[in-house]
Structures are given as structure tokens and as C-alpha cells.
């Protein structure tokens, strides 16, 4: 009876552990990444990060559209008001606790640069 109880308890926790596991995949490492047409002279803006994610409650997604890599890249670029992402890293992450909650989506990080010249500021008169 005691062995059966331990086996059942172990099996339950093992299934919960397997079910609650997530995954993360590096999709790409890129030197220059942009979803816009750009020339080749850059002005650095800083580090940028963007993501596009979808949550699950029970088994239902909180939005109908799938996570989109382009939206994650655009959000990273827009976070620093640039138009190019240098040294970009794109990750896909997902995890799910069965019948409770979960999340999946893309995360993009990199150095944001701009190809547009800064507006010149004339000194006050």
C-alpha cells in the first residue's frame, strides 16, 4: 500500500513537471536586421528590446493572432527610435502549465541604429 502510494505520488509530480516545462529556441543571430529599406551609414541609438507574445488562460489564447517575429523586431527598433537593429538576437519562448496558464512568443534584442541624420540644433541667439 505504501509503495503504491509513493509510486502514484511520484508519477503525479513527474507528469506535472513534464507538463510545466517550457522551451526556448534561438532563432537567429544577425549582424544587421531591418524590416525597412535603409542606407549603410548608421548612428547608434542604444540597446533595444521588443517582443510579441500571446498568453493562454486554461486552454484559450488571450488573442487570436499568432506571435509575429516582424512585430517583435519592429518593437525593438522603435524602442530607441531607430530603423536598423545591429547584432540582433531573436528568441522563441514558450511554456505552459496544463489547464492553467501559459505564454509563447518572440523576443528580439540588439543595438538600435538610425540611418537618418540628427536634426541640427542651432545655438540660441
Image (tube, rainbow, N blue to C red):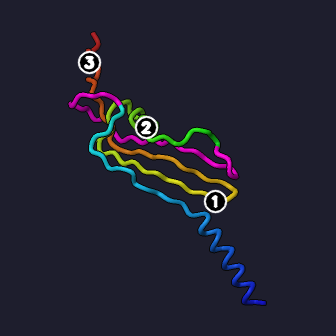
Name the residue nearer the viewer: 65 or 56: 65
Q: CA distance from mark 3 to mark 1?
A: 53 Å
- Sequence-wise first label, 3 or 1: 1
Give the labeled residue for mark 2. Answer: 70
Region in magenta? 36-61
Image quadrant for the C terminus? top left
Neighbours of disc 1 within 10 Å: few (<14), some (14-19), many (20+):
some
* Marks 2,3: beta carbons within 8 A: no
User: Is residue 81 found left or right of 5 in the rendered image?
Assistant: left
Using the numbered discs, state the Cα–Cα distance from disc 2 to disc 3 in whole angstroms. 32 Å
Q: Secondary structure at mark 1?
A: strand
Query: Which type of secondary structure does the marked residue at label 3 adopt?
Result: loop
| Residue ID at (43%, 51%) | 91
- Please give the residue where the numbered disc 1 appears in the rendered image: 97
Element under label 2?
Answer: helix
Quarter of the figure with residue 14: bottom right
Mark 2–mark 1 Cα distance, whole angstroms, equals 27 Å
Q: Earlier in the sequence, mark 2 or mark 1?
A: 2
Residue holding disc 3: 120
**Is residue 58 shown in magenta?**
yes
Dot 2: within a 10 Å radius of its alpha carbon, few (fewer than 14), some, or many (20 or more) residues? some
| Residue found at x 26% / y 18% | 120
Amino acid at each position: 500500500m505504501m509503495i503504491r502510494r509513493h509510486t502514484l505520488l511520484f508519477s503525479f509530480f513527474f507528469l506535472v513537471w513534464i507538463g510545466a516545462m517550457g522551451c526556448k529556441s534561438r532563432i537567429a543571430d544577425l549582424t544587421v536586421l531591418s524590416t525597412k529599406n535603409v542606407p549603410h551609414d548608421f548612428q547608434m541609438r542604444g540597446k533595444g528590446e521588443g517582443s510579441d507574445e500571446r498568453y493562454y488562460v486554461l486552454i484559450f489564447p488571450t488573442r487570436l493572432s499568432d506571435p509575429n517575429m516582424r512585430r517583435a523586431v519592429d518593437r525593438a527598433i522603435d524602442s530607441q527610435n531607430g530603423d536598423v537593429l545591429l547584432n540582433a538576437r531573436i528568441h522563441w519562448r514558450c511554456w505552459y502549465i496544463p489547464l492553467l496558464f501559459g505564454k509563447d512568443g518572440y523576443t528580439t534584442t540588439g543595438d538600435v541604429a538610425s540611418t537618418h541624420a540628427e536634426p541640427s540644433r542651432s545655438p540660441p541667439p
